[in-house]
Amino acid sequence: MDPANDAPLFHVGWEQDKLFRMSPDVVTSLLREQVPVLDFVDWRVTSIEFGQASSTMPLNPQSTNQHFTHQAAMFVLSADYTGGTALASLLGGWPVVGVHPVTSPESVSLWLLKTELKYLRPSVGDLTVTAVIDADKRRRVQQRFLAGKPVIETITMEFRNGETVVAEASATYFARQSTALRAEGLDAERVNSLYELKLTSSAELIAGVRARETGGLFEDPYARAMAGQHGVALATRFCQRSPQLGGMVAARTRHLDTVVENFVEAGGRHIVNVGVGWDMRAFRLPLPEGTTFYELDFPTTLRERRQRLDEQGVANPPGVERIETPIDVRTMPLAKTLEGIVPSDKPLLVIWEGMNMYFQEDEVRDILAGIRPLLAHPESLLWLDLVERDAIVNADQQPPSVREFMRGMQILGEPFTFGTDHPQRFLLDNGLSWLESVSSEAYFQDAGDPVYSIYRFCVAASAPLHHRDVPQTFRPTRVDGPARNPAPHVGFEGARNGAKNGFTAIDSALAGQS
């Protein structure tokens, strides 16, 4: 890949594109990384030209049956990725989700819809697959894709052993700009199935990670059942590729659990969870009677959440109420959406967990503007997590583990796109008063991995805020134990103080007074 190339769609010449994005060696390496069976059978892309591609499936013990001829499934596998590669070659400069590292929302979602395969004779030598897209289809693909419309095209392929044709196939693909898959508003009937899968998969993934981490910093007895087989498999793949993800989610879960428990202990009873996914705090935390969770998410996600809770027989704890509220956070301001639903005269704890790092900065600012009116009560709080901007925009200049972590998230199609190096300043710029910033590193003092230092958990309140006005619902986080490299703390007036009382990697408005 060429990290310096920021040219817009189709402004990348083919000669440049095939040196990086569509180099046969690059595509082979990336596909083998993403689809381990391709590596196992030693499949490779042998050539890519504009609108066409060829691949080779060796005749080896991994790819053959008892007659030492290619298994039928190997034909389909070769057809799928050869035809997809030929189609991707037409979309100059754009990364394909699930193949290329993705660094922004500008990506291609590509899916095989169906394959028809006709076998002519047994394959008894290396299997060469060639896919060619004719000139008319090439123009049509580019025109529709550039307009943001769905591309549905059938590509023909030929399979050979040397000069001998052994099979013929046609494969029909769907391709579209990933951002065009998003639904606008709440019309669940118009949601693209790929976008719905992405939303559900994200919830399953995090539940799967919590299932792997439960019993350490937190307990979540519901996580594995809510994640399901798909979520557990996703979590395994992500944690293998980016092993720090488990610890980061565990630290996040522990910190937010503590904030919730402190909030209700101080008398707060109303908790707004933006993007609830498969979060189970309403069920697993010790909550007093009268606690209400407002669970916000896209309608298809809420529908799936209800179904899974019903399947698991999970009932509301006594005295705890849950109120579902459908929302599209990109287009619907939160305060307006919750008008008449949440009380205006009671403290609210608003949770925005695990989302903003996947948005653009203008989207984050718009969402915070929609949250801010919800914090009008002097005891209301906002919890959110933030990633360091420098680690995102200058990943190639980071320590090796940070660089690899960021690339891993890009390869897996979940790139971080927003971050800030100054959480306190960013929150103030958005009309919020900063109360605390805790690095995930605080929970892994002996790990010695800089990845944990780039991920922080923040608590904020409505501005303006003075020292005497710090909400009683907020208590500074304490992480006990000696810190190997104690991080400095920012006092309420902005003065630098040394680490105190066993804190580490924590900046808090009240750090010196806990």
Image (spheres, grey):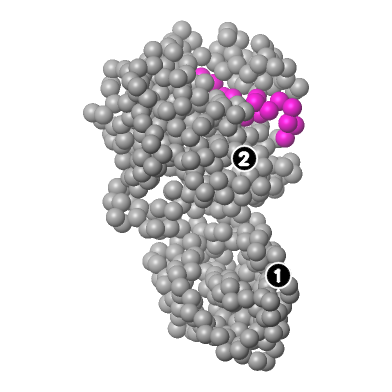
Q: Residue shown at 56%/59% (left/top)?
A: 98
Q: Is residue 398 above or below residue 122?
A: above
Measuring from the top left, give residue 203's x and y in whole percent. 47, 43
Question: Circle 2 is placed at which residue position?
Answer: 245
Of the residues shown, which amino acid type is indicated by label 1? Gln
Quadrant where the C terminus lies?
top right
Question: Mark 2 or mark 1: which comes first in sequence?
Answer: 1
Q: CA distance from mark 2 to mark 1?
A: 32 Å
Measuring from the top left, give residue 486's x and y in whole percent. 72, 20
Measuring from the top left, give residue 258's x and y in whole percent. 52, 21
Res. 481 image quadrant: top right
Q: For the magenta stretch, what is the residue range?
A: 434-449
At numbered mark 1, what does the secondary structure look like: helix, strand or loop? loop
Measuring from the top left, give residue 213's x and y in whole percent. 60, 34
Q: Residue shown at 39%/19% (left/top)?
A: 380
Q: Is residue 110 above or below residue 336?
A: below
Quadrant where the N terminus lies?
bottom right
Q: Residue shown at 73%/75% (left/top)?
A: 60
Marking on residue 62? 1
Marking on residue 481? none
**Which sits in the foreground, 401 or 250?**
250
Of the residues shown, which amino acid type is indicated by label 2? Leu
Q: Is residue 445 inside the magenta stretch?
A: yes
Mark 1, Cα crowd under 10 Å, few <14 / some 14-19 / many 20+, is: some
**Which is more foreground, mark 2 or mark 1?**
1
Q: Is residue 200 inside the magenta stretch?
A: no
Res. 507 image quadrant: top right
